[in-house]
Image (cartoon, rainbow, N blue to C red):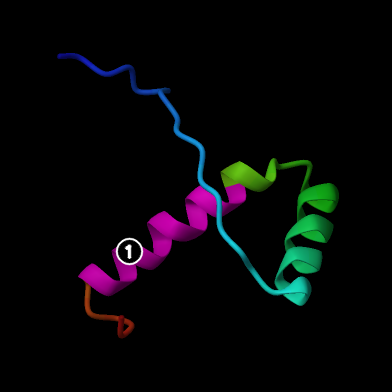
Amino acid sequence: MKVKKDFQVQLSTKISIPTWQALDEYSKESGKSKASIVEKAINLYLELIAEGRIDD
């Protein structure tokens, strides 16, 4: 089965109010969607763990 590269799934989670405010502010200032910021942050986090640069 082939999956389109742009296929996306919904993610629901809870974060602190200060984190939400920082994400909201950065999203507005940068013009980037919250979803794209969160996706990039998760990918970076997983990459750094895989490289042993941060602890899980």
Per the rendered image, the range of residues in magenta is 37-50
Asked whether, in this view, residue 39 is left or right of residue 3, the answer is right
Q: Label 1: which residue?
A: 46
Q: In this view, which residue lies farthest toward the left?
A: 1
Q: Is residue 38 magenta?
A: yes
Residue visible at 42% across and 23% down in the picture: 6
Q: Secondary structure at mark 1?
A: helix
The dominant secondary structure in magenta is helix
Residue 11 location (% of width, % of height): 51, 46
Q: Quadrant of residue 35?
A: top right
Please state the total of marks drawn on the protein image.
Answer: 1
Name the residue located 50 percent from the left edge and 49 percent from the top edge: 39
Task: Identify which amino acid the numbered label 1 is placed on.
Answer: Leu
54 w.r.t. 7: above or below:
below
Q: Residues within 10 Å of mark 1 (few under 14, many from 20)?
A: some
Q: Residue at x 64, y 68 (%)?
A: 15
Q: Is residue 55 above or below residue 15?
A: below
Instruction: Tell me where residue 16 appears, x and y as whole percent.
Output: 69, 74
